[in-house]
Image (tube, helix red, strand yellow):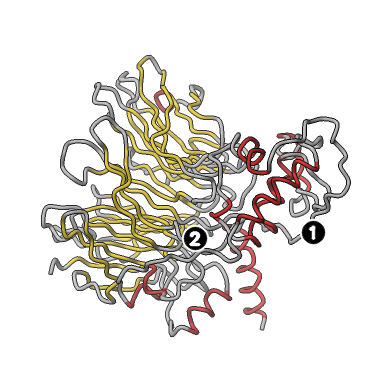
Amino acid sequence: MKKLIVLFCFVIFITTLFAIPFLKPIKISVDKDTSSNLYQDNESGASLAKLYCGSCHLFPSPSLLDQTTWKNKVLPNMAWRLGIRAGYASPYIDMDSSEAILVKGLNVYPNSPKISISQWKKIFNFYISNAPKVPTSIEFLPLIQKRVTQFITQPIFIEEKELPNTTMIKFDTSHSLLYVGDARGEVYALNSRLKLEKKWILPSAPVDMNFQSANPDVLCVGSVAPSEKKEGVSISLDSSIKFSKLARPVAMESADLNADGKLDLIICEFGNHTGKLKWYDGGDRLKENILLSRPGARKLEIVDLNKDGKLDLIVLMAQAQEGIYYFENLGKNKFKESVLINFPPVYGLSYFELVDFNKDGFLDILLTNGDNWDLSRVKKNFHGVRIFMNNGRNQFTQTFFFPLYGTSKALARDFDDDGDLDIAAISFYDELEKPEEGFVYLKNMGNNYFEAFSTPAAANGKWLTMEVGDIDKDGDIDIILGSFIYSIAEMMGLINKGVEHFPQLLLLTNIKK
């Protein structure tokens, strides 16, 4: 019984790590207008929504979410941000006192209304009256064949765990070592036979690694749960902290951005209400350069996109202003920001890669959206894997979409060695009807057509992370998945579907058939 209680408490803790606190259902009362003298009130609900909701991010159409989700989750948060309190609980109700103080200092939820109550009622009614009654399902589900014959699957258990909580997988090609991070702050080094060679205990959950030095640097997120507390660190595996007080950092890269012969460090601080995309000249913590001062930086790539001889930054921004951002290197430590692709704030962008799908010499974008850990945890028919082709002028058009609820990552490689790029994709979704489709292999058949495969072994986990590389050193590209199961309820749901084992990792060994 004691062990069960301990496990239950741990699960509750882990659940809070990845779940943004939900707003409790409320009843809106709009009879009393306390600020009607502040604003003109003759606009329509649609025009008001486009003005106020579209001022902070791309305008979200009512059709994107169902009526209940708008009413009970999203619109209350909108109201808070517009200073509307009538009929709503306090925005600080689920925060501890220290967190509430930090958020209040940012004025995220202003005390004074930005619009009148009657204007808010129009916005509210516009969304409710134009939204579908239930979440819109994917209209056409593509055929996914049940067995991918190109790979042999093998579950990997690292030490004895109550639940798998993998937060990072990184493959060091130069040493053929696979590094695995756990939400408990543990990092494991596995050899080519996936046997444990070494273990480290770090301050918090590892999320990224940098192999530029003899002792690799690990990025620890600090608080995985939404927080303004700056508890993230960059730490060497020899335990020396390089950077501290980071706002929930999730990704880092090194490159010589200013061509001075020194490696610079770029860090994505995802943050919560605040965050940063920044780089450190020569890796010097005293030489901080801010590229973007807002939350949501999630992943970046460093390339010379415009082929002018200088390294540019391509960055995925999540949170409200979702999109792929281009920071053109102008030289002399200056960058010009522009947006390559943008989306409404509910799309849940989760990962991207720059790859040349059509071999025309220009980088295209492989993009996934499926992050569902927000105020709208419902099925979304726009979740999936997308390809945006480059027209040669760094203008991108979507040419491929594969629907998949909760898509968390996709990687494009020539897995079958036939000269074109295939795609490995994973889903981190709560309620997949077929849990084996948490992993999907898209085999490129040419002419922008892909055949889809899954494997029964993928049903044994919730795949938050994925890495590829020649794990077994036989000359082809293998795939390894990392599982994160955050609650007993979710584990029981998988058990009810016939799942019996819950490994931390799933290795897909490429046999090139």
Who's the residue at 36% across and 72% down the image? 458
* Gap in angstroms between the C-alphas marked 2 and 1: 25 Å
Who's the residue at 59% across and 50% down the image? 223
Q: Position of residue 162 (x, y in %)?
A: 52, 74
Who's the residue at 54% across and 51% down the image? 204
Q: Position of residue 291 (x, y in %)?
A: 48, 27
Location of residue 459 (image quadrant): bottom left
Which element is circle 1 on? loop
Which element is circle 2 on? loop
Who's the residue at 36% across and 18% down the image? 330
From the viewer's perspective, tell me whether residue 69 is left or right of residue 76. Answer: left
Looking at the image, is mark 2 or mark 1 earlier in the sequence?
Answer: 1
Residue 418: image tag: none
Q: Residues within 10 Å of mark 1 (few under 14, many from 20)?
A: few
Asked if disc 2 and disc 1 are in contact, CB closer than 8 Å, the reply is no
Residue behind mark 2: 380
From the viewer's perspective, tell me whether residue 400 is left or right of residue 130. Answer: left
Q: Quadrant of the C terminus?
A: bottom left
Residue behind mark 1: 27
